[in-house]
């Protein structure tokens, strides 16, 4: 599959077949929230509010929302170094997320994690990860626990095209296939590992084709199409929950911004970025589909967009007014008690 | 009284008892279900607990440890058996960046045991690495290094009742060491060293396979009228600073013996902390004996020269005791 747009190619609306029509406004709201949250990081990194900047997922909203909306609340997800869209889609409080980026005490993990390590077990979010491909292993282990205990929930790993060139990704996929674990491995192929185009560093036909060699169902989907992602993940989830093992999904997508905030982009042309924005924007594809079916009025779209802006503004205000954390105790520093708890 | 059993058997017994007690415990490793591991460390457990709980995996240290970390995050208590600690290098990210950091980063505990055979013996350079110091200075990991069958059982019980990742090191040369283990042995707390032999003239602080060597040296020293106190650290993190310091305050002399290379490492930490805390009690500089700073060779006579021997311990201890403090 190749979804790289030609200049001037029209936006093809999302096919709403099989999608829960009454939930689509919420999907759209979430995609708008992610878009606003991620775009706000640019200025917040520049003025130092978000120390170290952040990896934004602008352009990749449909992968997170389509996938997570196909899951049950008890399902667990893990992501990599570009995790905000998954976290928000899974239900992370935007205030707690933003305060974490700011490094404040009110952050979702008290300022210990930052952008790459937002996590919240109460919503089934195992967290981001700074190590490329590591999310696959963590989710695989969670899936193993579910299988051992006969639980019905599944685990999902999000990772990028860069992870498709690390050994650990495939070691973990293989083990999931061998043990028939309820794992859904979702590769967000946004075309670039930092500045390296995947086409220049990948042997073989595609990432999905590579995965198929491990003996599990493996497909490519249009990651800009929230409906396509939803249907693929729903099918994978049904298979996993039925004890039929893991699925590999390569979602073709695109990030509009650099690898990290504030980067000058020299490795691709603005024409390329603009073509994706003009023809493949996941939000426009969804609004197009909803409007065609009379599920969205212009006024409602404007209202939802304003709501998203207000939520993000509130989150930023909350973060900015929150206190800095303190290094209170060794427990906080290491997360480890000097002597194991549970000793007699 | 029970018959003496090997350290490997004691470990396997400890694991089996805990697996009977706690359904969350299971084992991931290579060649463990039938073979019971390269050192018989889980022999018989396959038949006892079945293939679901004694899981043979492909040779992928990264995937095995990742499976363990993920399952632990989900509330299980896995044991990942890496065969040799050298093979941990294939899973170093999963150990250091995942297992050790998760509780700090996310608040979720990682109750995981990573068992590996360690120490210097045969099989040459790539099967004899010492990572004792490196692992025990990594925030988030606990490190056990038992020297007796009883400790092997007591420490694995504690590891399997805790909620943090434990690196459990079993020395190659100790796997077949026999000792009596009480049926109702209590879990041994981490961070509690043990005085293996009481003495008054010098504290010899060590662990693992150097413990029997230090005891042999203490016999030789006693024949020369020097009563050495031999301390077995048992866990490298946490370290039992209280016991070490109390001993050195009493004996006023200290020698630290490790098999890992002399520079850095566990010995460096013990010596530095003693210097900080008991300097005024010392009658002589603290000495340390470590392994040679070299990859380990194949030839047995060369191997012997790479690690501390009882004769070295006795010689250096006598020298420390003989040195008179400058007034």
Image (tube, coloured by chain):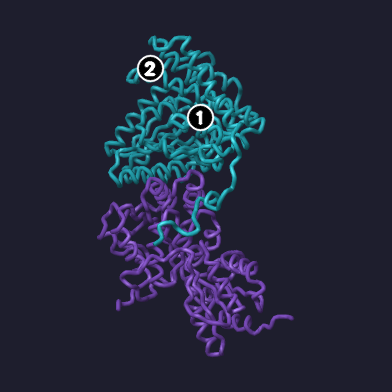
Q: Please state which of residues B95 and A5 is positioned toward the viewer in this rendering.
A: B95
- Tell me the mark number nearer the camera, choosing from 2 and 1: 1
Left or right? Give the position of A264 relative to A301. right
Which label number is shown at residue A94?
1
Rendered colour, chain A:
cyan
Q: Secondary structure at mark 2?
A: loop
Q: Is residue A195 visible?
A: no
Q: Please state which of residues B21 and A179 is positioned toward the viewer in this rendering.
A: B21
- Mark 1 is surrounded, within 10 Å at the Cα level, by few (under 14), some (14 to 19) or many (20 or more) other residues, namely many
Height in image: A227 above or below A245? above
Q: Is residue B301 visible?
A: yes
Q: Please state which of residues A274 and B286 is positioned toward the viewer in this rendering.
A: B286
Q: Position of residue B321 (x, y in %)?
A: 62, 83
Q: Position of residue A117 (x, y in %)?
A: 52, 40
Which label number is shown at residue A15?
2
User: Which chain hosts label 1?
Assistant: A
Left or right? Give the position of A106 relative to A77. right
Q: Which chain is purple?
A: B
Q: Secondary structure at mark 1?
A: helix
Work out whether mark 2 precedes mark 1 in sequence or the reverse, and give the earlier one: 2
Q: CA distance from mark 2 to mark 1?
A: 29 Å
Instruction: Respond whether the residues carrying marks 2 and 1 are from the same subunit.
Output: yes
Height in image: B270 above or below B90? below
Picture quadrant where residue A263 is located: top right
């Amino acid at each position: 599959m190749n979804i790289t747009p030609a200049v001037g190619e029209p936006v093809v609306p999302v096919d709403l077949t099989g999608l829960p029509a009454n939930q689509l406004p919420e999907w759209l709201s979430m995609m708008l929230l992610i878009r606003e949250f991620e775009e706000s990081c640019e200025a917040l990194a520049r003025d130092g509010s978000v120390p170290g900047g952040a990896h934004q997922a602008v352009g990749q909203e449909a992968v997170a929302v389509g996938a997570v909306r196909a899951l049950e609340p008890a399902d667990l997800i893990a992501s990599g170094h570009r995790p905000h869209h998954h976290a928000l889609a899974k239900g992370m409080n935007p205030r707690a997320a933003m305060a974490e980026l700011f490094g404040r005490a009110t952050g979702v993990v008290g300022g210990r994690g930052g952008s790459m390590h937002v996590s919240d077990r109460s919503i089934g979010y195992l967290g981001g990860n700074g190590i490329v491909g590591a999310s696959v292993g963590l989710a695989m282990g969670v899936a193993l626990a579910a299988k051992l205990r006969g639980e019905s929930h599944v685990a999902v790993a999000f990772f990028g095209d860069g992870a498709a060139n690390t050994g650990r990704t495939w070691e973990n996929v293989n083990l999931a296939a061998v043990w028939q674990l309820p794992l859904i491995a979702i590769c967000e192929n946004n075309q670039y590992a930092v500045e390296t185009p995947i086409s220049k560093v990948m042997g073989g036909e595609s990432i999905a084709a590579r995965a198929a060699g491990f003996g599990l169902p493996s497909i490519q989907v249009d990651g800009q199409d929230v409906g396509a992602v939803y249907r693929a993940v729903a099918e994978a989830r049904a298979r996993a929950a039925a004890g039929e093992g893991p699925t590999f999904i390569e979602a073709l997508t695109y990030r509009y911004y650099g690898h990290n905030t504030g980067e000058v982009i020299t490795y691709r042309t603005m024409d390329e970025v603009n073509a994706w924005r003009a023809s493949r924007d996941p939000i426009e594809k969804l609004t197009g589909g909803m409007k065609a079916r009379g599920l969205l009025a212009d006024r409602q779209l404007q209202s939802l967009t304003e709501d998203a802006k207000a939520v993000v503004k509130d989150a930023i205000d909350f973060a900015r007014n929150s206190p800095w954390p303190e290094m209170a105790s060794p427990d906080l520093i290491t997360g480890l008690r000097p002597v194991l708890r549970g000793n007699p | 009284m029970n018959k003496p059993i090997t350290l490997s058997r004691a470990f396997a017994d400890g694991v089996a008892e805990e697996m009977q007690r706690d359904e969350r415990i299971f084992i991931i490793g290579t060649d463990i279900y039938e073979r019971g591991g390269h050192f018989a460390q889980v022999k018989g457990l396959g038949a006892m607990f079945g293939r679901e709980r004694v899981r043979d995996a492909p040779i992928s240290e990264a995937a095995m440890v990742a499976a363990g970390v993920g399952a632990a995050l989900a509330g299980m208590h896995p044991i990942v058996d890496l065969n040799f600690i050298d093979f941990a290098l294939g899973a170093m990210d999963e150990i250091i960046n995942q297992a050790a950091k998760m509780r700090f980063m996310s608040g979720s505990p990682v109750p995981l045991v990573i068992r590996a055979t360690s120490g210097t013996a045969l099989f040459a350079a790539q099967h004899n690495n010492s990572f004792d110091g490196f692992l025990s200075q990594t925030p988030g990991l606990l490190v056990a290094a038992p020297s007796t069958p009883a400790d092997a059982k007591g420490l694995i019980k504690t590891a399997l009742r805790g909620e943090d990742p434990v690196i459990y090191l079993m020395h190659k040369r100790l796997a077949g060491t026999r000792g009596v283990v009480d049926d109702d042995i209590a879990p041994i707390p981490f961070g509690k060293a043990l005085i293996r032999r009481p003495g008054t003239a010098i504290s010899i602080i060590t662990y693992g396979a150097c413990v029997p060597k230090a005891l042999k040296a203490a016999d030789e020293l006693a024949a020369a009228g020097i009563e050495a106190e031999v301390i077995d650290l048992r866990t490298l993190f946490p370290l039992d600073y209280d016991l070490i310091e109390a001993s050195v305050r009493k004996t006023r002399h200290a020698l630290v013996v490790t098999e890992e290379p002399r520079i850095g490492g566990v010995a460096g930490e013990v010596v530095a902390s003693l210097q900080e805390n008991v300097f005024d009690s010392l009658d002589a500089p603290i000495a340390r004996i470590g392994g040679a700073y070299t990859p380990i060779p194949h030839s047995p006579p060369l191997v012997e020269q790479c690690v501390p021997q009882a004769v070295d311990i006795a010689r250096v201890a006598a020298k420390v005791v003989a040195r008179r403090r400058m007034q």
